[in-house]
Image: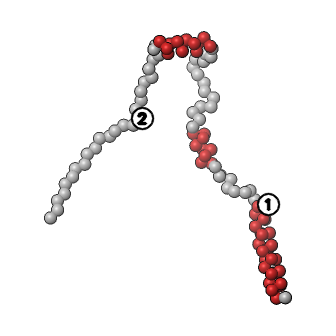
Amino acid sequence: MNIDRARRAALFAGILALAGCTHNLITEQPGDLAFGEANRQTMMAQVVDPDPVYDQPQVYSGDHAAQAVEAYRKGAVKEPERLKTTSAIGGGSGGGGGGN
């Protein structure tokens, strides 16, 4: 009979512990509200301008595209300017040392 009471007491204690855990799940928001904020900031930084404004109206026509393809085939397309993305900085180190 003592074992039965001990089991009941352990079961009751377990139920109370689980009831305390579920209180947080019901009353509070699950997880951290800032979860994923770094990902959202990175995605926003990759958007250059979602609503660009151009000085000249953009032409979208089949004739214009055909002329561009023909110019490409003839080799009459202006080569884009090459930009260096890295630069080398020269440096030197002096050495010297002597031992005994």
Residue ranking furthest to the right: 1
Q: Position of residue 90 (x, y in %)?
A: 29, 41
Q: CA distance from mark 1 to mark 2?
A: 53 Å
Disc 2 element: loop
Disc 1 element: helix
Q: Residue at x 78, y 74 (%)?
A: 14
Q: Position of residue 50 (x, y in %)?
A: 62, 31
Quadrant in which residue 55 is drawn: top right
Q: In this view of the protein, can residue 57 be seen by the observer?
A: no
**Which residue matches tag 2?**
85
Looking at the image, is 9 positioned above or below residue 85? below
Q: Quadrant of the N terminus?
A: bottom right
Looking at the image, is 90 positioned above or below residue 9? above
Q: In this view of the protein, can residue 86 be seen by the observer?
A: yes
Q: Position of residue 85 (x, y in %)?
A: 42, 35
Q: Residue at x 83, y 84 (%)?
A: 4
Q: Is residue 11 left or right of residue 60?
A: right
Q: Nearer the viewer, residue 41 or 86?
A: 86
Looking at the image, is 46 positioned above or below residue 100? above
Quadrant in which residue 66 is drawn: top right
Q: Is residue 84 left or right of residue 99?
A: right
Q: Quadrant of the C terminus?
A: bottom left
**Which residue matches tag 1?**
26
**Quick one: label 1 or label 2, which is nearer the N terminus?**
1
Q: Amino acid at mark 2?
A: Thr
Q: Residue at x 60, y 24 (%)?
A: 53
Q: Position of residue 9 (x, y in %)?
A: 81, 81
Q: Amino acid at mark 1?
A: Ile
Looking at the image, is 95 positioned above or below residue 64? below
